[in-house]
Amino acid sequence: MDNIGYIGLTRQSGLLQEMQTVANNIANLSTTGYRREGVVFTEFVRRAGDGVPSISFASAGGRLTDPRQGALTATGGRLDFAIEGDGFFLLDTPRGPRLTRAGAFTLSSEGALVNNDGYRLLDAGEAPVFVPPGAADIALAADGTLSADGQPLALIGTFLPADPGGMIREAGTRFRAEGGIRPAGPVRLMQGFLEASNVSPVQEMARMIEIQRAYELGQNFLDREDERIRSVVRVLGQ
């Protein structure tokens, strides 16, 4: 295959990855705390030789998480928490601390606040948050102070990745911070609310159509290039 074919294939591969990302965003329109993901394209330029134009290859070299906040929806749940501002809840998982914006929690049999996967919520000191058995009135203040029957229990922690570029999505709403974490700035915590996905269905569908058209154009170009090469081979072989 010549250089034109390789260049076309790298473009098609990147578009395919972007299409998969957009499809995943659309699939998570209703996922609590989900943040839209995009593909970052990079360009690799190689010198072809003296007096010959350089060759440029495209690559889907990374992914970018949209930091915009999703809409806050009132649920009335006493263990449904939402963050208004920049920051993430911190979860204790078997693979280490993980960041999330999904604030739907329940009480485990030991009294720990856990998410839907059973991972414990951590406080500002990165310790698990527990609620005494039989607590009737659980309240969360805007500063993150969690109380039960009027007695303070813990300060819910909110964190940010120390290196924003090192935040890696591990699951739908969980992130790993490659460079570690740091406390978030001033935020407001809200009880009885959940953050919705920040995916715009209209924008994602429009982007999907654009990618599909670009992919079809690229495929048509590769088909024509393949036919051109075949024609040259037939002529030279006569």
Image: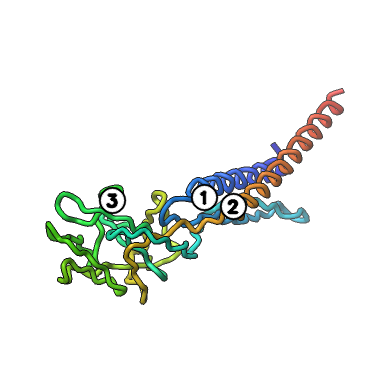
- Relative depth, front residue between 229 and 159: 159
Q: Secondary structure at mark 1?
A: helix
Q: Circle 2: is it few (<14), some (14-19), or many (20+) Cα within 10 Å?
A: some
Instruction: Tell me the number on the disc at residue 236.
Output: none
Comparing labels 1 and 3, the label whose residue is closer to the camera: 1
Q: How is the image coloured?
A: rainbow
Q: Can you identify the residue that label 1 sits on?
A: 25
Q: Secondary structure at mark 2?
A: helix
Q: Can you identify the residue that label 3 sits on?
A: 95
On the rendered image, what quadrant is the C terminus found in? top right
User: Count the marks: how many?
Assistant: 3
On the rendered image, what quadrant is the N terminus found in? top right
Instruction: Tell me the number on the disc at residue 204.
Output: 2
Which sits earlier in the primary sequence, circle 1 or circle 2? 1
Q: Is residue 201 left or right of residue 111?
A: right
Q: Circle 1: is it few (<14), some (14-19), or many (20+) Cα within 10 Å?
A: many
Looking at the picture, which amino acid does disc 3 mark? Arg
Which sits earlier in the primary sequence, circle 1 or circle 3? 1
- Relative depth, front residue between 56 and 96: 96
Toward which corner of the image does residue 99 lie, by quadrant?
A: bottom left
Q: Position of residue 120 (x, y in %)?
A: 24, 55
Q: Is residue 51 left or right of residue 37?
A: right
Q: Position of residue 107 (x, y in %)?
A: 21, 53
